[in-house]
Structures are given as C-alpha cells and as structure tokens.
Image (cartoon, rainbow, N blue to C red):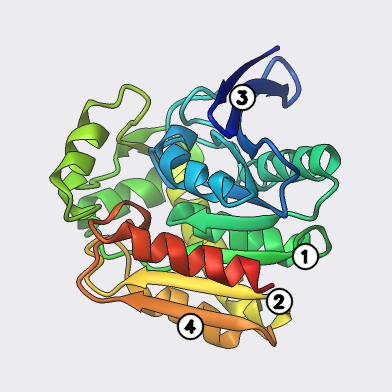
Amino acid sequence: MGSHTLETDLYYSHSYISFGKGQNLFLRTIMPKRNASHIVSIVHGLGEHSGRYVTFGSYLATNQIGVYTLDLPGHGMSYGKRGHIKSFNELIEAVDMCIDKATQESNNTPILLGHSLGGVIASIYALKYENKLKALVLSAPAFRIRVKVPTYLRLIAVVTSHLAPALTLSNNIDPGALSHDPDIAKAYTSDPLVHDRISVRLYNEWMRASEVAISSAHNLSLPILLIQGDEDPLVDPSGGKLFYERCSSKLKDAKVYASMFHEPLNEVDKQQVYLDILTWIKNL
C-alpha cells in the first residue's frame, strides 16, 4: 500500500515495506519525471526521520537524481519502541531492504548517504555490502560524540545493558545545535515524529559499531565524500576524519564548512552544501 503525488517535475511517494513478523518500515521516494541519472538512498540520524530530508531530496530530484529514504526501526513511522533496537544488524538489514528496493525499481546502483548516527550505519553497511553501492556520502558521521554523557548514565548503561537493554533515556540533543537557522530548531521541536529517546542497547551498539567502522575502514574502496561543519557541537569531526583517512578509496573528497553546526544540509548556507554534493555525484 502506498501514496503517490505528482508535483511539477517531481514524483513523491511513500509506502510500507514488510520487515517480517508484522513489522513495517516506512519508505519515502522522490523521483524526477524522466529517468534518474543516479539514485541516492538516505539514512537519517538519531531521533529524526526521512521527512526531514524532503527539501534536500527534492533538490536532488530536480537535478535528475532519484531519492529513496526510510524511517529506521524505532523512528518516524516505522515499527518499534522509540529509540530502541534489538541489535545494530537490525538497522543494517533495514537499510539493505531500502537499497535492494531502490536497485530493483530504478535499475541503478545506489549511492548511500548517511547523516550522524546514519553515517555510522551507512559506513557499516558499506563495509558489509560494498558491491551493492556506487559510492558513500557521510554527513557529520557520529563515530565520536561531543554530547556529554553524565557518569551516572554511563553506569546505568553498564548495569542495565543485560538486565534492561530496552530502557530508554533522553538523548540530550539540543535542537539549537543543529543549525544556525532558528526555524530548523523550531521545526525539530514541534515535529511529532521527532523523539528524544535512546535505549541502553542502541547506545552500546552504536559505540561498538563506531569502533568497528574506524578499525575496518581500510577495507573500504568505494568512492567517498565526507561533509562536516567545523563548529559541530554534537559530533567530534575527528572521528569522521579518521575513518575517511583510513579508507582505501581512490576517489575521495572531504568538505569542511566553516562555522557550520551539526546539520550542513539544514544550515543557512545549505545551497552551497547541496551544490557540492550534486557536483560530486555528477562527476562519479
């Protein structure tokens, strides 16, 4: 079951795809009327959802690049307790379903773009399924975080990791740290599909996956583009830099944007970021 809307030269649709045992993943697509020259699959970050990428996705589609993006388990309109996962592999396999669907429907090998936690997910996915991708784009990948986790919460995470892994706590994301554009913070705060939850298991799996990604980065040879704001209050850019430097890719580029916060795609000067990504993709 799905919904379709045709606006000007773009074709918007959404549907649910079965993830087994009554679990459904919400999938959103934005396509140009004519055949897309490339396909980009977007993996969102912690607490958000695919709807926050419609503006960027529409820009890509206007430039003949089709977009597939899903709400991760525990997020948006997909199944699951908010901010909780059974394992990191649950996220990887959800992305795999999106990639397979995009490949089958478009007859094109997708480019995978991941933001923040989505950047970690995209990196692990690329290491596991490199043959299914054309390239990898990482936006502020959250291999290392700057958000201070109080000592007592770290202790809770250790104690409850086996006893109560589904226990959720606040993710401590400050909406004002996302962008210099105040409207972004307002929209984030008022968005009913945005949540502030993170479970003990998701936190532990995320930290573990980050270390695995960095230690295994030398095995990745896909073309890679890294974009980061140099004033990101939430993510330490050194993690993304280290992953990028260790990749064996022959084609790789990094863009560090002066004075930008955590979401370059939602910054005041986002049009330059959009153009840089578009140009890089078109030159693949």
Q: Nearer the viewer, residue 167 or 220?
A: 220
Numbered disc 4: secondary structure:
helix
- Disc 4 to disc 2, C-alpha distance: 13 Å
Quadrant in the rendering for residue 221: bottom right
Q: Residues within 10 Å of mark 2 (few under 14, many from 20)?
A: many
Quadrant in the rendering for residue 18: top right
- Give the residue displayed 49% in from the left and 36% down from the top: 50
Q: Residues within 10 Å of mark 3 (few under 14, many from 20)?
A: some
Q: Position of residue 245 (x, y in %)?
A: 54, 87
Numbered disc 3: secondary structure:
strand
- Disc 4 to disc 3, C-alpha distance: 37 Å
Residue bearing mark 3: 13
Cβ–Cβ below 8 Å for labels 3 and 1?
no
Give the mark nearest the N terminus, 1 or 2: 1
- Give the residue displayed 70% in from the left and 12% down from the top: 1
Give the mark nearest the N terminus, 3 or 2: 3
Asked if one can make out residue 176 in the rendered structure from this viewpoint, the answer is yes
278 relative to 61, above or below:
below
**Residue 242: which disc?**
4
Give the mark nearest the N terminus, 4 or 1: 1
